[in-house]
Image: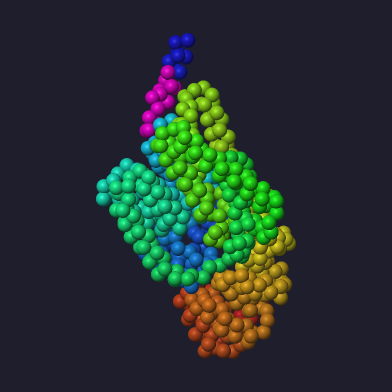
C-alpha cells in the first residue's frame, strides 16, 4: 500500500505544481508523439514543384534574389504559374536544402519544430490573459486540432507556420514590452511575417487593435514603425512582381466575379466553423464554386452564420451588462481576431481555392480566445473532475484524428485518393492520381483521371498532363490538341517544351520551327530544352548554321550531357532521325 502511494506521489509531481516550464515540456512531448510518423512521409503535391524540381532553392547564392524578384521567373520559367512572392519561405527551403538536399525528413522536422513553437508562443500569449491551466489547454487544442494538421504535414504549407511564428513572436513582444527597441523589433518581425506570406498583414491589424485597446501611449510609435515595415514590403514586392502583376487562375472560384464569389461566402464561413467543431472530413483542396443562389448553398448557411455571429454579439452585450469592462474588452478583441481572420479568406479577393483548412490557422486563435474568456467569466473550476475528464476526452479525440491524418500524407497517391473521396470538387486530387498512374505506366487509368480533372476544372496543368498521356499512348494529334488547350489557361513553360519535343516526331517541321521561334521562345527565351529541340529540327531540315546557333543557346540554359553528344553529331555532319515509341524519343544516327 505504501509503495502504491509513493508511486502515485512520484507520478503526481510531474503535474503538481503545474508550471509554465511543465506546460512547454508537455506541448513539445505531445507534439512529437502526435506528429511523429509525419516526419517520415515523402514529398507530396506542390512539395515536388517547390523543392525537388525547383533549381532556384538549390543554391544559397540565390537567397538575395528571393527578396528582389518573383522566384517563379528565375531561369525564365513559371512552373507554379502566376504571382509568387514569399522570400522567407524560399529562404527556408534553401537553407534546409543546403543541408540535406532533396530528402524530405529535415523539411518535415523543421516544419514540425516551427509548428510546436507556435503552440508554445500561443501559450505565452494566452497566459497574459488567462490562468496557466486554461492557457495550456487552449494552446494544446491549437496544437492537436485536425484543422491545423495540414500546416504541420504538408511541406508546401510551411509558409503558414512561418508567418504565424514571426507574427506571434512580434505580438508577444508587444504584450510584454513597451520600449522603443521592443517596438522596432516587433515591427521587424512583422515584416518577416509578411515576407513569409501575405496573410502576415493580419498580425499588423491585430497588433494595432490590441495596442489601441490596451497600450494607447505606444500606439503612434508602433503605427509609425509598422508603416515603415509595410512600405519596405510593398516596395520590394512591386520591384519583384511589378505594379500590376499577371496572375494565373488556379481555381474555379477565381473565374467568378465579386458578386458570384460572394454567393459562396456564407458556405465558406460555415465551412470553417463546422470543421472546427466537427473535424471529421479533412481534405487539402476544397474547390466548390456556386454561381446560383439556392436555399442549401446560400440561405441556410447564411442563417446559421447569422446565428453564430448573433451569438458572439449577444455574448458581447451580456458581458457589457453583467461583468467588468476587462472581460468585455478581451472578448471583443478575440472576436475581432476571429472575424478579420475569416473575412480575409471569404473570397472578397479571389484566392486559389474556395476554402482550405490551413487558412483557419490564424482565425482559430480568436475562437480559442473567446472560449478562454467564457471559461474565465463563468469561473469554471478547471481542476474539477468533470472539467478534467471532458478536456482529456476532447484533446484525445482531436489528437487521434490528427494522428490518423498523418498517414494520408505518406505519398501523393494516398493523399490524393483520400482527398478525392472527401472533396468531390477537387480537380487537383484527380490530377495527382492521374500523374501517379502515368508514372506507373497505367496509361488508361491515368487518362481516365486526367479527364475527370479537366471535367471538374479545365486548367493548364491537367491539360498538359493529358497531352503527356496521349503522347505516350502514341496519339500525337490528341497530344498536340491537349497542349494547345493548356495554353488557353496559362503561360507555363512546360506545355511549350512538350510541344517542342512533340514537333520532332509529329507535324510539319517548317511550321513547327516557325511556332517555336516566333511563339515559344519569345515567351521563354531562356528555356534550354526548347532551344535544344529547335536545334534538332533545324539540323534535320538542313539549316546547319541555325542548328549550331540554337545548340549554343541550349548550352547556356540546359545542363545536359545530351547537348555535348548532339554537338559531336553536328560537327561530323551525320544524319539524325527521330524515332518515337511509347512517347519516348530516340535518336538514330546514320
Which quadrant holds the C terminus? bottom right
Question: Residue 422, relative to residue 22: is it above or below?
Answer: below
Residue 181 vs residue 562: left or right? Answer: left
Q: Position of residue 96 (x, y in %)?
A: 42, 54
The residue lying furthest to the top in this view is 1
Q: Position of residue 487 (x, y in %)?
A: 61, 73
The image's colouring method is rainbow
Q: Residue at x 52, y 53 (%)?
A: 343
Q: Position of residue 278 (x, y in %)?
A: 61, 40
Q: Start and end of the magenta stretch?
A: 9-24
Q: Is residue 410 visible?
A: no
The residue lying furthest to the left in this view is 180
Q: Nearer the viewer, residue 448 or 119?
A: 119
Q: Residue at x 63, y 46 (%)?
A: 303
Q: Nearer the viewer, residue 482 or 370?
A: 370
Question: Residue 499, relative to residue 114: is it above or below?
Answer: below
Q: Position of residue 532 (x, y in %)?
A: 54, 78
Q: Residue at x 45, y 69 (%)?
A: 241
Judge whether residue 22 is colored magenta: yes
Q: Residue at x 45, y 14 (%)?
A: 5
Number of numbered discs visible in the structure rendering: 0
Q: Is residue 380 visible?
A: yes
Residue 523 vs residue 16: left or right? Answer: right
The residue lying furthest to the front in this view is 321
Judge whether residue 397 is colored magenta: no
Q: Quadrant of residue 403?
A: top right
Question: Residue 49, relative to residue 568: is it above or below?
Answer: above
Amino acid at each position: 500500500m505504501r509503495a502504491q502511494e509513493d508511486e502515485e506521489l512520484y507520478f503526481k509531481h510531474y503535474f503538481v505544481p503545474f508550471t509554465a516550464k511543465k506546460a512547454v515540456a508537455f506541448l513539445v512531448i505531445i507534439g512529437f508523439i502526435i506528429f511523429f510518423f509525419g516526419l517520415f512521409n515523402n514529398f507530396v503535391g506542390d512539395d515536388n514543384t517547390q523543392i525537388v524540381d525547383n533549381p532556384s532553392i538549390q543554391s544559397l547564392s540565390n537567397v538575395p534574389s528571393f527578396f528582389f524578384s518573383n522566384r517563379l521567373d528565375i531561369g525564365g520559367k513559371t512552373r507554379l504559374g502566376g504571382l509568387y512572392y514569399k522570400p522567407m519561405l524560399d529562404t527556408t527551403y534553401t537553407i534546409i536544402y543546403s543541408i540535406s538536399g532533396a530528402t524530405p525528413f529535415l523539411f518535415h522536422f523543421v516544419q514540425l519544430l516551427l509548428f510546436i513553437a507556435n503552440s508554445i508562443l500561443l501559450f505565452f500569449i494566452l497566459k497574459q490573459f488567462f490562468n496557466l491551466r486554461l492557457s495550456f489547454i487552449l494552446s494544446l487544442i491549437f496544437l492537436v486540432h485536425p484543422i491545423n494538421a495540414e500546416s504541420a504535414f504538408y511541406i508546401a504549407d510551411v509558409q503558414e507556420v512561418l508567418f504565424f511564428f514571426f507574427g506571434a513572436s512580434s505580438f508577444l513582444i508587444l504584450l510584454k514590452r513597451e520600449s522603443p527597441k521592443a517596438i522596432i523589433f516587433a515591427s521587424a518581425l512583422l515584416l518577416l511575417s509578411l515576407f513569409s506570406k501575405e496573410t502576415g498583414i493580419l498580425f499588423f491589424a491585430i497588433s494595432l487593435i490590441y495596442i489601441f485597446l490596451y497600450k494607447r501611449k505606444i500606439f503612434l510609435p508602433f503605427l509609425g514603425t509598422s508603416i515603415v515595415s509595410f512600405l519596405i514590403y510593398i516596395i520590394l514586392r512591386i520591384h519583384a512582381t511589378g505594379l500590376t502583376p499577371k496572375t494565373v487562375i488556379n481555381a474555379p472560384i477565381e473565374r467568378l466575379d465579386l458578386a458570384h464569389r460572394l454567393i459562396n461566402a456564407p458556405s465558406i464561413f460555415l465551412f470553417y466553423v463546422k470543421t472546427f467543431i466537427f473535424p471529421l472530413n479533412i481534405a487539402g483542396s476544397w474547390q466548390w464554386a456556386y454561381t446560383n443562389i439556392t436555399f442549401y448553398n446560400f440561405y441556410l448557411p447564411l442563417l446559421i452564420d447569422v446565428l453564430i455571429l448573433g451569438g458572439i454579439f449577444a455574448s458581447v452585450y451580456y458581458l457589457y451588462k453583467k461583468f467588468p469592462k476587462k472581460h468585455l474588452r478581451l472578448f471583443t478583441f478575440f472576436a475581432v481576431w476571429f472575424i478579420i481572420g475569416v473575412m480575409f479568406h471569404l473570397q472578397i479577393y479571389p484566392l486559389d481555392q474556395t476554402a482550405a483548412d490551413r487558412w483557419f490557422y490564424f482565425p482559430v486563435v480568436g475562437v480559442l480566445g473567446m472560449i478562454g474568456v467564457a471559461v474565465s467569466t463563468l469561473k469554471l473550476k478547471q481542476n474539477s473532475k468533470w472539467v478534467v475528464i471532458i478536456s482529456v476526452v476532447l484533446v484525445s479525440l482531436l489528437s487521434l484524428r490528427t494522428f490518423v491524418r498523418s498517414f494520408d500524407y505518406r505519398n501523393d497517391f494516398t493523399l490524393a485518393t483520400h482527398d478525392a473521396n472527401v472533396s468531390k470538387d477537387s480537380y487537383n486530387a484527380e490530377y495527382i492520381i492521374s500523374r501517379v498512374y502515368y508514372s506507373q505506366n497505367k496509361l488508361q487509368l491515368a487518362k481516365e483521371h486526367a479527364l475527370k480533372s479537366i471535367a471538374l476544372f479545365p486548367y493548364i496543368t491537367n491539360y498538359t498532363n493529358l497531352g503527356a498521356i496521349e503522347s505516350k499512348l502514341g496519339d500525337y494529334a490528341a497530344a498536340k490538341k491537349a497542349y494547345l488547350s493548356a495554353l488557353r489557361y496559362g503561360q507555363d513553360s512546360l506545355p511549350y517544351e512538350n510541344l517542342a519535343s512533340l514537333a520532332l516526331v509529329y507535324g510539319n517541321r517548317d511550321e513547327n520551327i516557325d511556332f517555336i521561334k516566333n511563339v515559344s521562345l519569345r515567351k521563354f527565351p531562356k528555356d534550354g530544352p526548347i532551344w535544344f529541340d529547335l536545334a534538332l529540327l533545324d539540323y534535320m531540315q538542313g539549316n546547319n548554321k541555325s542548328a549550331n546557333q540554337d545548340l549554343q543557346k541550349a548550352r547556356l540554359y540546359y545542363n545536359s550531357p545530351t547537348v555535348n553528344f548532339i554537338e559531336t553529331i553536328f560537327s561530323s555532319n551525320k544524319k539524325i532521325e527521330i524515332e518515337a515509341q511509347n512517347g519516348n524519343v530516340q535518336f538514330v544516327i546514320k
